[in-house]
Amino acid sequence: MKTNRLYYHDAYLKTFTGRVVERLAHNDHMALVLDQTAFYPTGGGQPNDLGQLGGAQVIDAIERESDGAVLHILASEVQDQHLSGEIDWTRRFDHMQQHTGQHILSQSFVQVAKAETVGFHLGQDNVTIDLNRTGLSPAAIERVEDLANQVIFENRPVTARIVSPDELASLPLRKPPKVEHDVRIVQVEGFDWSACGGTHVSSAGQIGLIKIVKVDRHGDETRVEFCCGHRALADYRRKHEILASVASELSIGYWELGDALARLQTENKETRKKLSDAQNKLLLVEADELAASAQ
């Protein structure tokens, strides 16, 4: 039985009730299939939701390929037929911020650098996209970041809906959908149209901020690590604390760290040269003393 996925209609739904239609075992845990659920199962680069169902912790949610049913993997058994569920909202909203941010960032790379996204990973500690080209300059990366954040600052509406085949053919999709029927399109108004089954914020402003933190070459591709929303704030906070601490140790302002580092490197180089010269002179003195005391 295909599960009715409530998050398709309301990604902000935190609680729900569902009827158990199947009980089974999955890796030594009870798994339940409900007639409807708000739990997002792992897929499309986005991790599953966590939370509780009937008082038991949901430790995983996966999609059964054979029929599209969502399996809720529980930490303990439950016996009731009708269950109340609650989503771990902090985790869900974080995923919504990162995933919608990825759509905007990927479209920004297309518009600025003609770089297509060929991979997406949303992890607990980092979020990455893989681009189908290399050689992106720091200036180009900065323009991409500026465009993505401009869309956020404009607070463009974000909508998701199932479209007909005729309408699908007329949309400027960033990449072709992987399915042929019941294609769900997530649209960032006037900016990006993507086939996606994930959970998203309802307006771009709720992402808060997109910050690219690392760019690496991987063969013929470029891997871009970034963070959005609360993750971006946490990243800024950590780095600010480090800069402030180092600056305090040197009794300077953080804006002077670049010059201070260059000065310390120069002083270190000069000190090492003086030390090397002194060691060479000491070796000559020791050699003379050994020669003078030789039989």
Image (cartoon, helix red, strand yellow):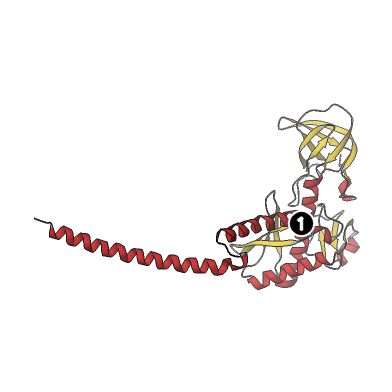
- 262, above or below 240, in the image: below
| The N terminus lies in quadrant | top right
| Amino acid at dot 1 | Gly
Residue 223 appears in the rendering: no
Q: Position of residue 142 (x, y in %)?
A: 69, 70
- 272, above or below 179, in the image: below
Q: Quadrant of residue 259?
A: bottom right
Q: Position of residue 270 (x, y in %)?
A: 41, 68
227 or 241: nearer the viewer: 241
Q: Which residue is mark 1?
A: 229
| The C terminus lies in quadrant | bottom left
- 248, above or below 80, in the image: below
Left or right, 205 with respect to 141, comes to: right
At x 83% / y 31%, what residue is drawn? 55
Q: Quadrant of residue 85?
A: top right
At x 80% / y 50%, what residue is drawn? 93
Q: Quadrant of residue 278?
A: bottom left
Residue 268 appears in the rendering: yes
At x 81% / y 36%, what residue is drawn? 52
Q: Secondary structure at mark 1?
A: helix
